Amino acid sequence: MSKSARDVVITGIGIVTSLGIGRAAHQALLSGKEPLKPAVDNNWEAHYAVHPLPEIDWSEQIPRRGDQRQMENWQRLGVFAAGLALDDAGLKNDEDACANMDLIVAAGGGERDIAVDTLIVEESRKTNDREVMLNEKLMTELRPTLFLAQLSNLLAGNISIVHKVTGSSRTFMGEEGSGVSAFETARARIAAGQSTHCLVGGALSAERPDILLMTQSVGIADKRQGEAEDPSAVTPDGVVFGSAGAFPVLESREHAEARGATIYATLDAVEGDRGSRDAGKLETRLGRLAGMVAPEAGAVDLVISGAAGEPVIAAREENWLADHFSTAQLRRQALAFGHVIEAQFPLALALGAIAVSADVPTARFSSEGEADMPTAPKTALVTALGFQRGEGMARLTRAA
Amino acid sequence: MASKFTDHLGRPIVAVTGMGVLTSLGEGIEDNWKALTAGQSGIHSITRFPTEHLSTTIGGTVDFMDIPVANSVERSHAMARKAATEALAQAGISGDFDGPLFLAAPPVEPEWSMRFDLGDRVPESARDGNAYAQFLSVLRDKPDAYVQESMLFGTISERLADDFGTRGLPVTLSTACASGATAIQLGVEAIRQGRTDRALAVATDGSVSAEALIRFSLLSALSRQNEFPEKASKPFTKDRDGFVIAEGAATLVLESLESALARGAKVLGILAGCKEKADSFHRTRSSPDGGPAIATIRGALEDAGLDESGIGYINAHGTSTPENDKMEYLAMSGVFGDHLKSIPVSSNKSMIGHTLTAAGAIEAVFSLMTITTGTLPPTINHDNPDPAIELDAVPNVKRDQAVTSVLSNSFGFGGQNACLVMTAEPA
């Protein structure tokens, strides 16, 4: 494919998962001969399996203690991963570049104070005037700054404060679809000349029981709570949340080449859609997306599936992929890293970019149901399928 | 290089062909505009929940929606649907919209009523440990899809996409108090990219609850002038003490001028310029020198191909907080200099309060109404002007004055700044 100044390329990858910190660590993991071994824990308060945060020294990317204190782990993780991305792209502390850099964050809400919520629920069982009790307790028990740690747009706000990325700042919400829209929007802006470089990504810190309501309320959470002694050895039967932050740096080829940046991959296309998943409609939609994103199906040699892990939808996607991308090898992100909601598509893109930039076959993400690759991948298809709604796809190719 | 359908940079001109609005003043553009230009306030004592123990007990809540369950998702969706229905009718578009949806929506937390209800479902023997572990045990025994429906951030845009047949994956966004402006900017960008001929920009906020109010209270952001609710929001005055939390929704149908005229649509105005610029100074405060806000206003003018003399009226962010009003004045002075004195500047928030996520879009609708009607809405409660803020605030009474270009400012927590420039249809 011929190069163009407005090609959208990936020049930096900030990544943190339960399996490690940074692009190099993940490059090493993905280059291994053995399948990835998930770090799964079910020995936390909610007794659901979770892919926990790795040990992180926040100070490496968030030097001021005051900044660290203003955030909870979700925002810390996102700001940390964003900092890694800027380092990796060679843009950290480049004041001019950061002041003109656009930012799109795919975000949910931040952590709640579980102890205060529990206290109020307990009190509610003792009083007939719940709403008045609620006022009283919230006025006295809520930590004022916790609001800022909860606000969706304050992950982006903290990235601006800590890393001085201040071109523009947008926060997209709406679970997995927000991650897809973030890249669709950023890519379209760069391709149209409306932006030259953009930091895009998201984060999830999964060790918080409140988010499990999203899956357990509809019975799609993994059902092994507290049962499996080594949960990493058992295939999950539902959604298992993970902790990850992923921030690729997107740039126009012209902008990247002018500053001599390393190009890991080109982001050729991103599309998203939503709608009913009844009777074949999901497959029809996936087909339409694939037609736009990767019309030359035979060229795709790696598929990183961002299916959430709900077994029925995951199986439908696998069957569809086997039909449409029969020559590609499948890697299922949720099995190795857990499901990271808003960060699911950003993480899949980060992993895909790492995979196509390396000159080696991509390791299996699971010891079951995935085959070794004969050669190093050159073209990757990345997908996201929301646990409730929304689908997205992107194509990445190795930098020529 | 500019043609009839392209702007000074050769980009497609973006027209507004439909608008809808809903605030504490009422439903629909006609009622709202009548009340707004009459200087009427929609602020009242809150009755949605008890206000004992609260330091602020007033708001611009929208209490006239018919919703199946009293929660933020249902209220925000119902208001957005009303505003979008009005806008599409005005635009003369029926059937599937067939363009992208950009929705500014509040980051909703589950309601406390839901937690209480889940808490009640926990058997006595299991009432131990953290509340969420208890809720999860209840849901393991009996799933409840509505719990999910009322907590996913994607619920409102999913429903609107089905309601109006929008195309592709809808974008739900939050840039705090600038969200409404950002939704419009995303639509403008998509049309300028040539990705679509039309876009639906919707902004809604029906999220006033005790917890939401208390969170802002604890940050000392809200007015405590509870005694005379309709007097509490007093932007640019000496005795302003915080914003008044409020609800509302607005929708704008954005179309390339070319496609609007081709289908014979009436053009209400032009979305001529947009700009956003983030501030890295502080989580809730703006840079003391106003630098990012100044850059945002300048950028919007430049995007519209106008200079400082090209703006006839400013629809201010004007929250009535001590900090914002001072900073906004500093930023406007920085851009317009002495010329600022001759530009009328008014704040809709003096009447409708701060509609948070929806504010940027509601105020864009009112900005366009200013252009189409030749009436400047007043800043009410402007009885004791802050001497440090020398503005023609259109004090207390509307003014008949033709304007052909309006700047609308939006600034929010998290260093969010967004400005829009709207103009009359090119002659």
Image (tube, coloured by chain):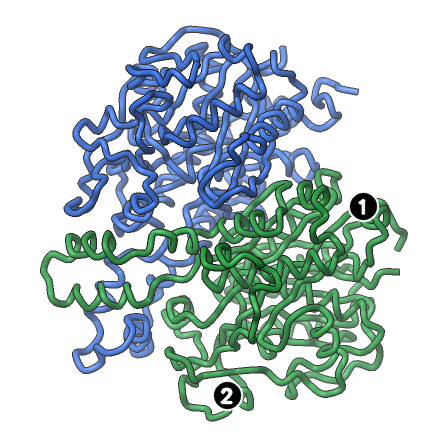
Chain colours: A green, B blue
Name the residue that disc number 2 marks.
Answer: A231
CA gap between label 2 and label 1 equals 46 Å
Q: From the viewer's side, name the closer residue of A173 and B310.
A: B310
Classify residue B20 as left or right of residue A33: left
Residue drawn at point x = 57 percent, y = 16 percent = B336
User: Nearer the observer, disc 2 or disc 1?
Assistant: 1
At label 1, the amino acid type is His
Horizontal and vertical percent for residue B256? 64, 28
Residue A255, label in figure: 1
Residue drawn at point x = 34 percent, y = 45 percent = B219
Count residues near mark 2 (Cα–Cα under 10 Å), then give few for <14, some for 14-19, many for 20+: many
Residue drawn at point x = 34 percent, y = 20 percent = B237
B271 to A269, vertically: above or below: above
Q: Secondary structure at mark 2?
A: helix
Rendering quarter of residue A307? bottom right
Q: From the viewer's side, name the closer residue of B328 and B397.
A: B328
Rendering quarter of residue A357? bottom right
- Number of numbered discs on residues: 2
* Quarter of the picture holding the N terminus of chain B: top right
Classify residue B37 as left or right of residue A205: left
Residue drawn at point x = 50 percent, y = 65 percent = A278
Horizontal and vertical percent for residue B383? 28, 15
The answer as to whether the residues below labels 2 and 1 share one chain is yes
* Quarter of the picture holding the C terminus of chain B: top right
In terms of sequence position, does the residue under pointer 2 or pointer 1 come before the other?
2
At label 2, the amino acid type is Pro
The reply to whether residue A322 is in sight is yes
Count residues near mark 1 (Cα–Cα under 10 Å), then give few for <14, some for 14-19, many for 20+: some
Residue at mark 2: chain: A
Classify residue B178 as left or right of residue A57: left
Q: Secondary structure at mark 1?
A: helix
